[in-house]
Image (tube, helix red, strand yellow):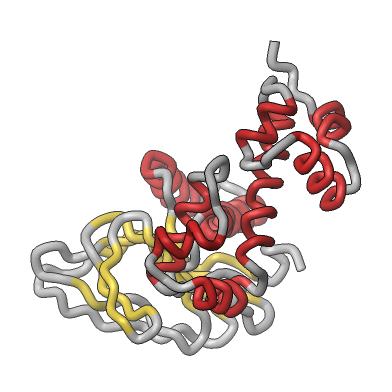
Amino acid sequence: MYITENIRQINSVSLYQAPDHARVQPVTIPPKSENIEIITGGEVFFDVNGSSRTFHRGAIFWHLPGEQTVWQTSRHAPYNCLSVRVATYDAPERRLPRVTFWENDDDLTVFTREALRSFHDDSIDRDVLHPYIYAKIFWQAYYYTRRKPDPDYPLFLRQLLDHINHHLAEDLSIDALAALSGVSVPCIHAQFRRHLNQTPHRYILNRRLQYARNLLAGSRLPIKELGAACGFANIESFYRAFHRCFDITPGEYRSRHRLHLD
C-alpha cells in the first residue's frame, strides 16, 4: 500500500502551545484517525518502554486510534507543537515507531510555516496538499529510522549501532565491539537477533555494502580505496561480497549509476 492510500483527508493543521501551568488534558485518538505531533519548542515527557524520557524540538509523535496525545510537560519549558489531524478510510496500521525525529532544524521551520500557510489557504488544491503534508512527515520519520537506532533498543545497543555506522572503515569484529561496549559477545549476538533479526556480522556487512553503493554512485574514489573506506580488508573480498549481495560488480554498479562529477 502506498503511504497515502488510506488517507481520506487532513482535518486540521495547527500550532498548539501548552499552558504555563503545565496541566494538559490528553486527547484520545478516535477510530479511523491519526494524530501527528511535532515538537517545535519546550519539552515533553513521554513513556518509552515503561521509562519516562524527555523530548525536545524535532520529536515526532505518531498516534493511532486509542492512543493519547502528549501531555506531560514542565512549568519552566511548556511544549509547543505542530499538530496534524488525519482522517483515514480504514483503521490505520503502525508503519513507523511511535516516536521518531525530524533532524534538520531549518527544514522543520520551513515546513511548519509552509504547512500552516498552505492548509489555511483555500486556493490550494486539497488533493495535492494533503498527500504532500502527510508524505513529507512520513519521510522524515522513516528516514530517521533508517539512520538512527530505534529509541526502544537498549542503550548499549543504540550506542553500538551508532559506533558501527560512524566507523565502518575500522575494526568491527565482535570481540572489538564487546570490548568497546563492556557487554559480552553472547549478549551482543542475542540482542542483535532479538532487535534486528540478524547477526552482528550481517548487520555490519549490510551497512558497509550500502555505504559502498553510495560512494560508487557519488564519488570518484578508486574502487580499491573505496573498498578500504568501507571496511573491506582487500579488493577481492569487497568484490565477492558486493557481487554476492547485488549480483553485479562494483565497477558495473558505478557505470550504471555514475554521476557527472566533472
Asked if 244 appears above or below 62 in the picture, the reply is above
Residue at 44 percent of width and 53 percent of height? 102
Query: For the C terminus, which image quadrant?
Result: top right
The percent coordinates of residue 72 (x first, y second) are: 24, 77
The percent coordinates of residue 80 (x first, y second) are: 26, 61
User: In the rendered image, which quarter is residue 92 located in?
Assistant: bottom right
User: In the rendered image, which quarter is residue 169 located in?
Assistant: top right
Q: Is residue 218 left or right of residue 249?
A: left
Q: Is residue 153 left or right of residue 39?
A: right
Residue in front for this viewpoint, 69 or 118: 69
User: In the rendered image, which quarter is residue 193 located in?
Assistant: bottom right
Q: Is residue 215 left or right of residue 44?
A: right
Q: Is residue 106 left or right of residue 233?
A: left
Residue at 53 percent of width and 53 percent of height? 147
Residue 87 visible in rendering = no
Residue in front for this viewpoint, 178 or 10: 178
Residue in front for this viewpoint, 230 or 217: 230
Residue 246 visible in rendering = yes
The percent coordinates of residue 35 (x first, y second) are: 47, 72
Asked if 10 appears above or below 220 in the picture, the reply is below
Residue at 33 percent of width and 80 percent of height? 47
The percent coordinates of residue 150 (x first, y second) are: 49, 67
Residue in front for this viewpoint, 97 or 165: 165
Residue at 52 percent of width and 80 percent of height? 64
- Furthest-top residue in this view: 262
